[in-house]
Structures are given as C-alpha cells and as structure tokens.
Image (cartoon, rainbow, N blue to C red):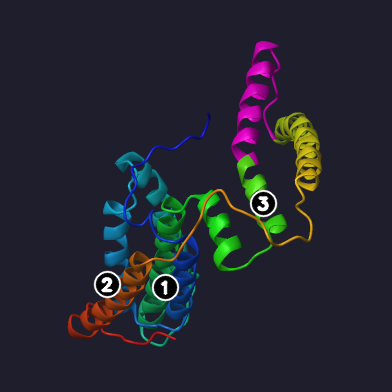
Amino acid sequence: MIGEITYHSTWLHRLNPSMKLMAFLVVFIGLLFIHNPNFLLYFIIGATLIYLFATGHTWKMIGLLALPLLIIFVSSATAMIFFGEGETTWYQFGLIHITEESFYRGLHLGLRSTVFGILSLIFALTTRPVYLFYSVMQQMKVKPAYAYSFMAGIRMLPIILEEFQTLRQAMKVRGVVFPRGVKGMYQKVKQYSIPLLAQSIRRAHRIAVAMEAKQFTKQTERTYYYKMVISLHDLLFVILLGAWMLVTFYFSMEFSLFPVENVR
C-alpha cells in the first residue's frame, strides 16, 4: 500500500498510548513556563538522542522528518532576532536591528519550537493510531462512536492518497496537460479535488451506515479486540521523564552555555 512505513518496535512502542499522551502533554505545558534557553538546549539534546535511537525507524526516515525541525528553528528564531526590540544593539542595517535581547529571545523561541517538534515526532513515530484510540476508549472513557469515527477518518488518508495517485496516472495516460501558472494550478486543483471529494463523501456515508448497523450509538458497554492496560513499564516511563527533567535542570544550572536564565 502507498505510504506504508516500516520500523522495528522499541520500548516506546510498548507504552500505553494514553499514558504517553498525558505525560507528553504535561511536559508540553511545563515547558511553556520555562524561559531558560540553557534548559531548552539540554532538553533538546536528550530528546534528540531518544528520537535517533528509540523511535525504531530508518535513518532515512528520521533524517527526512528532521528537516522541517531545522526550518522551524531557523524561521522562528531569525524573525525575532532580526526584527526584535532591545537596548544593546549588536548590528543595524535598514529594517534589520539585532540586539542582545532580541538575539536571546529569538534563540529561546527557536529552541522551544524545536522541542515541541521533536516531542511531537517521538510521539507520532512510536504510537500506532489504532492502539491510541483503543486506549482512549478504555483508559480515558471516550465513547466508542467518537473514537471509531476518528480512527476511520485516519484510516481513510492512505486510501485517498492511493486514489490521488491513480487519478494522476489516469490523466497522464489520457494526455491531460495543464497550462502553467495560476490558471493551470486552479484547473489542476479542480480536476483532482472534485472526484476525490465525491469518493470521500460516498465512503463516509458507507462507514456511517456500517457503524449504525454495528450498534455504534449511545451504548457505552462494548468488548474490545485489543485490550490496553497500564503496566509497570508505563510507571517507569513517567519516572524516567521526571529524572530527565531533573538532569536537564542540573546541567542548565551547572554548565550554562548562554549568559541568560530568563528571556521573557
């Protein structure tokens, strides 16, 4: 199937998805209140090691997915560095005004964006959507009708991609050529979007009928093919996250690379 990704299972794949999701959300919220670039830098180093060696994906896939992180860091940091405000001017030319304050604020913004990006990638690469929705239903008590609807929607994405490839090859065989420029782009979007949208509506209708036939209504008591449980493994993961935060805090205090601790 188009879009199939191969990987080997690691200890992160064996965690309960709901526990992992909640733990990452707590880390996300905690990082919003940290304004020390030294802490964020050391946190990124730890997250990068996990991303490289514990996600179980190929080096090619890891490298490709890491490229947007670099773009996010550069774009978010440079916008603040070049056009930020401050009193200690380092460089000024036209609209560009780099100050000491804007430099560290931009660096802090770039590091924070990168942290969120790496953690999101770690979660996405080590969590199977099916297990996540089963866990959400069993541990977080989300109604099966909603969870299965989201799961069905995600499962439709590879099918839509496959239909897009088929449609493109059919147009190529028939010799369809689009003009260059905005007009050609508009025609291309129109030719592709209408059949894909029509097929998606038909498929969504069939899924809705099938779910009603299988009693996906207000009934909450159901049996599950996958039984998701919270184990000692998940507790050790939470302890590891706490230890990771403490070690990062220690390194940021003892081995500061930037002469600022608060860039708000």
Q: Residue 166 versus residue 4: which sits nearer the camera?
A: 4
Q: Is 130 displayed left or right of 183 in the figure?
A: left
Q: How many marks?
A: 3
Q: CA distance from mark 1 to mark 3?
A: 42 Å
Report the Cα–Cα distance between label 2 and label 3: 39 Å
Q: Is residue 196 left or right of residue 159?
A: right
The residue shown at (51%, 55%) is 227
Q: Is residue 260 above or below residue 92?
A: below
**Residue 196 found in image quarter:** top right
Crowding at dot 2, Cα within 10 Å, few <14 / some 14-19 / many 20+, comes out as: many
- As for residue 169 lying within the magenta part, the answer is yes
User: Between disc 2 and disc 3, whose residue precedes?
Assistant: 2
Q: Which residues are magenta?
A: 156-181
Farthest residue to the left: give it.
Answer: 254
The answer to which image quadrant residue 197 occupies is top right
- Considering the image in quadrants, where does the C terminus appear? bottom left
Residue at 62% x, 67% y: name it.
141
Residue, disc 2: 42
Q: Earlier in the sequence, mark 1 or mark 3?
A: 1
- Determine whether the residue tagged by mark 1 lies in a helix, strand or loop: helix
- Of the numbered discs 1 and 2, the one sitting upstream in the chain is 2
- Residue 30 locus on image (x, y percent): 44, 80
Residue 90 percent location from the top left of the image: 34, 77
Prevailing secondary structure class for the magenta stretch in the rendered image:
helix
Disc 1 target residue:
106
- Percent across and percent down for residue 48 are 30, 60
Badge 1: residue crowd in 10 Å (few <14, some 14–19, many ≥20): many
Residue wearing tag 3? 148
Question: Does the magenta segment cover residue 165?
Answer: yes
Which element is circle 2 on? helix
